[in-house]
Amino acid sequence: MNLSWLTPADRLSALPPYVFARLDELKARAREQGLDLIDLGMGNPDGPTPQPVVESAIAALQDSANHGYPPFEGTASFRRAITAWYLRRYGVELDPDGEALPLLGSKEGLTHLAIAYINPGDLVLVPSPAYPAHFRGPLIAGGKIHSLILKPENDWLIDLAAIPDAIAERAKILYFNYPNNPTAATAPREFFEDIVAFARRHEILLVHDLCYAELAFDGYHPTSLLEIPGAKEIGVEFHTLSKTYNMAGWRVGFVVGNRHIIQGLRTLKTNLDYGIFAALQTAAETALQLPDVYLHEVQARYRTRRDFLIEGFSQLGWKIPKTRATMYLWAPCPPGVGSTDFALSVLQQTGVVVTPGNAFGAGGEGYMRISLIAECDRLQQALQRLHQAGIRYESAVMEPTDVTL
Ligand SMILES: *Cc1c(COP(=O)(O)O)cnc(C)c1O
């Protein structure tokens, strides 16, 4: 039967395959074969949501005032909690009525921002590698992506000087993200000053994803875009509760910054959704008000795993620099081995799942991302299996594979 009448819109065929979905299929197949998978592939935090947040949600559930449609723009009380948190963390005042908007997770907002602002053919600057929503949103909107290739010799920072003037003049939006997923790179404050100056000079809407605002170690404090003078005139910043508070399933994030940009996103969303269940907005307020000791515990947990894995991988011949933030390690695949082949081979030989770097764009080719989402005893098992399979940085034993991602 001819199924052409069921063909989805062109905007979907513009998308490259979602590698995570493919990896999921392969993982399911490996599980069927009885493999005990150690999944360090996803960015899904493994801990429970803090108990005070859960209790606050339970109490809010009992209040029937929360059972109807929430306000489009989020509850006033959650928006005030967002701006109070922002003031406390970064010393910058924001207007809860217009400069902060709750989102159904930051991925939703990052993607919808593209749909609200990009016309077909508009040029969008996106690093490669990048978090997939940063290029998939613009692609769905019909935008043209100009990739900014990140390189180890630049510490995975965007090389602004390498962007041709003609490209910068045409660009409508620049997406960026430090501390970075997937490279775990951090950017110094001067970089933020440079990128704000660049965006102002070329009149580019600047979108910063500060997903890892709190997951930083060894005294490092990530910079927020809006700390930079002038940033609010041209930019917005996305935040999420998913990672810091182990709330990935709750779908709560927010955007702060330029009120005109936020208004455009809000106008689109008014036509699409009603925002977050009000009871969950109450719980999210509780999360943002947790004492810092909670953050210190989370940070210590990831730092311990980071140190454990970096040491373990060094015994397998890998030199992985110490990261200062995020829940990832970013490591080269053995010389001459492609990311997909390497990740599949590791999965098939050991049941350990890592993400091939090219899942984040061509600029990630030759690397793998390892998520710090298991306890050290489990990480130890992963290392042992790599060791037993003879997988080392210099001399990975590669089995031919007929599976293609
Ligand atoms: C995990 C992640 C997100 C997604 O956050 P949600 O709020 O759960 O949608 C966004 N950006 C980056 C860089 C991430 O790693």
Image (cartoon, rainbow, N blue to C red):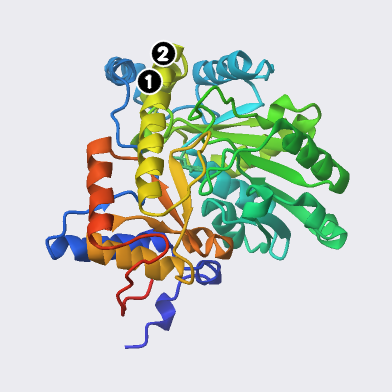
Q: Are marks 1 and 2 in contact (CB under 8 Å)?
A: yes
In this picture, is 392 found above or below 13? above
Q: CA distance from mark 1 to mark 2?
A: 6 Å
Name the residue nearer the viewer: 106 or 389: 389
Left or right: 216 as drawn, with respect to 314: right
- Residue at the disc numbered 1: 297
Place of residue 28 in the rendered image (x, y in percent of width and height, measured from the top left)? 22, 61
Left or right: 206 as drawn, with respect to 288: right
Q: Is label 1's Cβ within 8 Å of ligand 1?
A: no
Name the residue nearer the viewer: 350 or 66: 350
Name the residue nearer the viewer: 292 or 175: 292
Residue 266 occupies which quadrant of the picture? top right
Quadrant of image for the C terminus: bottom left
Place of residue 395 in the rendered image (x, y in percent of width and height, measured from the top left)? 38, 66
Place of residue 339 in the rendered image (x, y in percent of width and height, measured from the top left)? 44, 65
Left or right: 239 as drawn, with respect to 64: right
Q: Tell me the element at label 1.
A: helix
Residue 64 occupies which quadrant of the picture? top left
Name the residue nearer the viewer: 305 or 252: 305
Q: Tell me the amino acid under the disc marked 2.
A: Val
10 Å neighbourhood of mark 2: few (<14), some, or many (≥20)?
Answer: few
10 Å neighbourhood of mark 1: few (<14), some, or many (≥20)?
Answer: few
Q: Tell me the element at label 2.
A: helix
Place of residue 97 in the rendered image (x, y in percent of width and height, measured from the top left)? 64, 21
Residue 149 occupies which quadrant of the picture? bottom right
Picture residue at 63% right of the left edge, 15% below the top: 87
- Residue at the disc numbered 2: 293
The answer to whether residue 178 of the structure is visible from this angle is yes
